[in-house]
Amino acid sequence: MEPIKANQEGIKGLDELSGKNLQKKEETEGKGFDRLLDETIGKVSDLQKEADQAIKELTGGEGDIVKAMIAMQKAEISFQTMIEVRNKLVNAYQEIMRMQV
């Protein structure tokens, strides 16, 4: 009788997991790739604006050089990452277009 009880508990666990996965899938579908891309580009733009603001404060004599350097590095790294992701997407698109149907 123990194996049946264990199997029933396992089935309940699977039901819970599938329910969670379904919920995550619905959340992901609601967001969409285009929105994710827009948000990412917006974040990169915000980091660049923060770096510009830090540089303006530094040149005005008000800012901290360490904060300005960190802001500039964050903006540079995020921009480079975005460019690399774009390159990977373009390469994937080109590879798909080369496939014979």
Image (cartoon, rainbow, N blue to C red):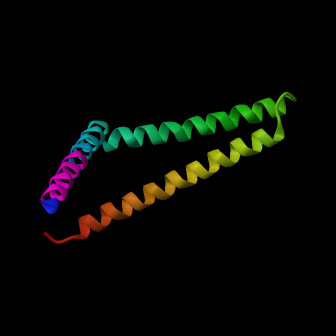
Above or below residue 74? Residue 38 is above
The extreme right residue here reads 61
Camera-nearest residue between 14 and 4: 4
Task: Residue 13: say if magenta.
Answer: yes
Give coordinates of residue 21: x percent, y percent. 25, 47
The residue that appears at 69% across and 35% down in the rendered structure is 52
The extreme front residue here reads 1
Quadrant where the C terminus lies? bottom left
Task: Residue 14: say if magenta.
Answer: yes
Quadrant where the N terminus lies? bottom left
Camera-nearest residue between 42 and 7: 7
Q: Would you say 58 lies left or right of 2 here?
A: right
The residue range painted magenta reads 4-17
The residue that appears at 26% across and 44% down in the rendered structure is 20
Give coordinates of residue 75: x percent, y percent. 63, 45
Above or below residue 62? Residue 65 is below
The residue that appears at 16% across and 55% down in the rendered structure is 5
Q: Would you say 88 lies left or right of 14 here?
A: right
The extreme bottom residue here reads 100
